Image (tube, rainbow, N blue to C red):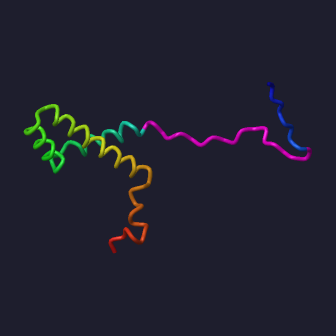
Amino acid sequence: MRRRHRRAPKGSRRATTRPETTEMVDLSVLPGYIAVILLFLGPPGPDMAYMLAVGLEGGRRAALKAILGIGTGMSVYATAVVAGLGRSPGRTRHCSTR
């Protein structure tokens, strides 16, 4: 069965051009973004202590899983901050520490 196209009522104006698209994110900042994430992964801290404890107890494979989990979590957090979600808790009354 063939469908027939409906015509617009007389006097109605349909847009004949598409709306302008928004600009894409500038990908030239991506290497710097990744470098900052890797910079935060390097210094020792609680993450390193956790990775060492897991590695000593479970071996290389367990340590690798710990490292990948830590890196993934930090990347998600950094992406949320870049998206503007980093200041959200301070804006709401029930999350404020003041």
Which part of the image, by quadrant, shows the C terminus?
Answer: bottom left
Q: Where is residue 52 in the image (x, y as percent from the top left)?
A: 11, 42
Most extreme residue toward the bottom is 98
From the viewer's perspective, is 85 left or right of 68?
A: right
Residue at screen point 33% across, 43% down: 75
Specify the quadrant of the image occupied by residue 7.
top right
| Residue 57 drawn above or below residue 94 | above
**Chief secondary structure of the magenta span?**
loop
Q: Position of residue 6 (x, y in %)?
A: 84, 36
Residue at screen point 18% across, 47% down: 47
- Taking depth in this image into account, of 62 and 11 the one nearest to the observer is 62
Most extreme residue toward the left is 56
Most extreme residue toward the right is 10
From the viewer's perspective, is 11 left or right of 97?
A: right
Residue at screen point 80% across, 29% down: 3
Specify the quadrant of the image occupied by residue 55.
top left
Most extreme residue toward the front is 1
Q: Position of residue 49 (x, y in %)?
A: 12, 47
Q: Give the range drawn in magenta.
A: 10-28
- Taking depth in this image into account, of 69 and 42 the one nearest to the observer is 69
Residue 69 is covered by the magenta coloring? no
From the viewer's perspective, is 19 left or right of 97?
A: right
- Taking depth in this image into account, of 27 and 92 the one nearest to the observer is 92
| Residue 5 drawn above or below residue 43 | above
